[in-house]
Amino acid sequence: MAKTRGSYARLAGEFGVIVVGVLTALGLEGGRQLWRDAETERAYLVALRDEVDLNASLISQYLNGTERVAAGLEGAITQIEGPYVEEARSDILLALMSAARQSGVVTGVSTAVFDDLRSTGNVRLIGDLELRRGMALTYARLESRMDRIDVYSERTDARLLHTLTGYGIRLRVRSAEDIDPTVLDRLAEDPALVPEAHREQARLEGILRTLELVVAGLERLSTNLDAAIAGEPLPN
């Protein structure tokens, strides 16, 4: 009987050693997987931050250019509505031409990193749920607002463009010196010019408001990504 109990004890001991060994192996493998997941998460965060910063930079550059065009158009409208000064013809013309050919299309904007994160299911690796929601919301707004800018661009009836070309003015002209001065004088007296310029002004303002919202959202996400990469609490 004592011998049997000894056999059971030995078997139990051997089984215990096996169980401990298996659990240790699983623990080590689990630890390695957690390390791999943490490294993958950080790599995604860095790549995503770089993509967000690039998009913010591209859109900011376009925003600045559009602001300059809008300011030039506002000045041109003021000059047209006030006493017409022949010496201002060149500035008026170039401002009108810039506004007429300014589109809302921003080239180079990318969502490749976030699309990969989502399509592969690796979005689960982003441990901070608040950051994960912020990423999804920012990219959804980026897409919808860029679509809205396209609508602003397509919505214009191009009357200002038609008016300019109707007077024989080609949009690629860079100087009023290349155009017959009498054409510019007649253009300034056209009663349709001011309403058409105001319509272009409203279109540009819509584009500017949308671009400002996009840049603000991207900059906020970039700040949060920086904090996550550094292992710090999200500031926003």
Image (cartoon, rainbow, N blue to C red):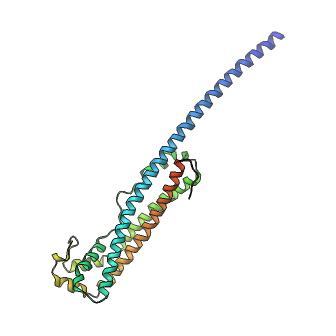
Which residue is pictured at 81% across the width and 14% down the height? 5
187 to 30, vertically: above or below: below
Of residue 75 and residue 120, the one placed in the foreground of this image is 75
Which residue is pictured at 28% across the width and 77% down the height? 96
Which quadrant is home to the C terminus?
Answer: bottom right
Residue 189 falls in image quadrant = bottom left
111 to 206, vertically: above or below: above
Residue 108 falls in image quadrant = bottom left
Which quadrant is home to the N terminus?
Answer: top right
Residue 12 is situated, as x and y percent measured from the top left of the image, at 74, 19
236 displayed left or right of 173? right
Which residue is pictured at 45% across the width and 63% down the height? 214
Residue 45 is situated, as x and y percent measured from the top left of the image, at 49, 48
Residue 120 is situated, as x and y percent measured from the top left of the image, at 48, 45
Furthest-bottom residue in this view = 83
Q: How many marks?
A: 0
Can residue 208 be seen?
yes
122 displayed left or right of 189? right
Can residue 144 be seen?
no
Which residue is pictured at 28% across the width and 76% down the height? 95
